[in-house]
Image: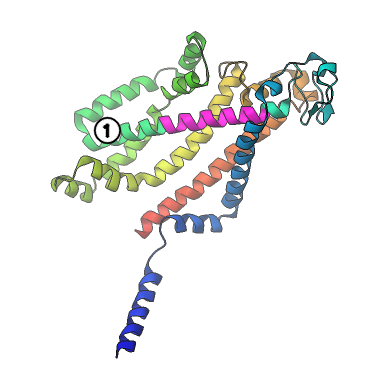
Amino acid sequence: MASNQNTEADIMADDMSASTPPMGFKVIVKEFAKDKLALGSLILMVAILLFIFIGSFIIDQDAATRVSLFDAYLPPFSSSTDPAYQGTEYLLGTDSAGRDIFGQLVIGARNSLLIGLSVTVITSVLGIIVGILAAYYAGMVDNVIMRVIDFIMILPQTMIIIIFVTIVSNYNVFSFILIMSAFYWVGQARFIRGRALTVGRLDFISASKTMGTPTYKIILREMMPNISSLIIVNLTLNFAANIGLETGLSFLGFGLPSNVPSLGTLVSAATNPDILENKSWVWLPASTLILVLVLCINYVGRALQRSADAKQRLG
């Protein structure tokens, strides 16, 4: 009798486990297993990031930015012609000042990624908090917040960033991150608010408010999970966009200080027709790296979005 009960219990347990939908990490793994392009993009992106961040600790920044006019525009796989630096090898060649392109590429990529990630985190946190609060409280609070956002959005933000970059004293990487973050959170706040307004009108949110559930629990446990897919795709797309924004400003000469390597600084050398046509090793590696990173981030972000959508559908 006992053995029969144990057998029935085992069968019921197997049925329950079979009917339980995969959640969390399993959903993500399943989605990446189905999408080979996203999986390949994830592997490639992780490999590039590891190479950049490990390499940036190994490479000496002073040596990478060292000026050697004897070594100007050396092609890839060349040795230094400067007697002071005899025996130095340049894997990707040198620029107009004889600086190592490979060293600048690795250190510049690290700087661009850190800036893009920092700006993405800061603006996303501000945008999510402001957008959800505006949608949750609605009414006068929403009107005031949205008028402030509208005012900031109608400003020529890129021009204002350029002005701040020009006039700020002791300008550095930290200042650049703060200046960019001060203006680029408003678009995300408006985006999150639009979705949160729809979620805030659902019956279970109204029921939670009626039952006296604390505001932070409603926001974190009921509203946030229902907009998680939008937050994920917004984070990934904004990360790629912020990398492009930093490199674009550096390309124009209003990004990082001139003594700090950046992908945008390397790409800006292509404004010279002679370099563009005859010395492609100066700008092509940085341009290729930007393209590959942005594409990888986008493909990974789309896979994560599908995973979040699947998780919501499964409960």
- Whole-percent x, y for residue 315 in the image: 34, 58
Tell me if I can see residue 234 in this picture: yes
The reply to whether the magenta stretch includes residue 309 is no
Which colouring convention does the figure follow?
rainbow
Disc 1 residue type (three-letter): Ala
The reply to whether the magenta stretch includes residue 116 is yes
Residue at image position (59%, 40%) is 295
> Of 239 and 158, which appears nearest the observer?
239
Tell me if I can see residue 291 in this picture: no
Where is mark 1, residue-wise? 134
Residue at image position (78%, 31%) is 91
- Whole-percent x, y for residue 307 in the image: 45, 53
For numbered disc 1, what is the local secondary structure?
A: helix
Q: Vertically, is 93 above or below 239?
A: above
Quadrant containing the N terminus in the rendered view: bottom left
- Whole-percent x, y for residue 95 in the image: 75, 21
Q: Which residues are magenta?
A: 105-122
Is residue 53 found left or right of 216 in the rendered image? right
Is residue 230 found left or right of 169 in the rendered image? left
Is residue 71 found left or right of 124 in the rendered image? right
- Secondary structure, magenta segment, majority class: helix
Residue at image position (58%, 25%) is 247
Q: Vertically, is 147 above or below 36?
A: above
Is residue 163 found left or right of 52 in the rendered image? left
Q: Residues within 10 Å of mark 1 (few under 14, many from 20)?
A: many
- Whole-percent x, y for residue 262 in the image: 62, 24
How many marks on residues? 1
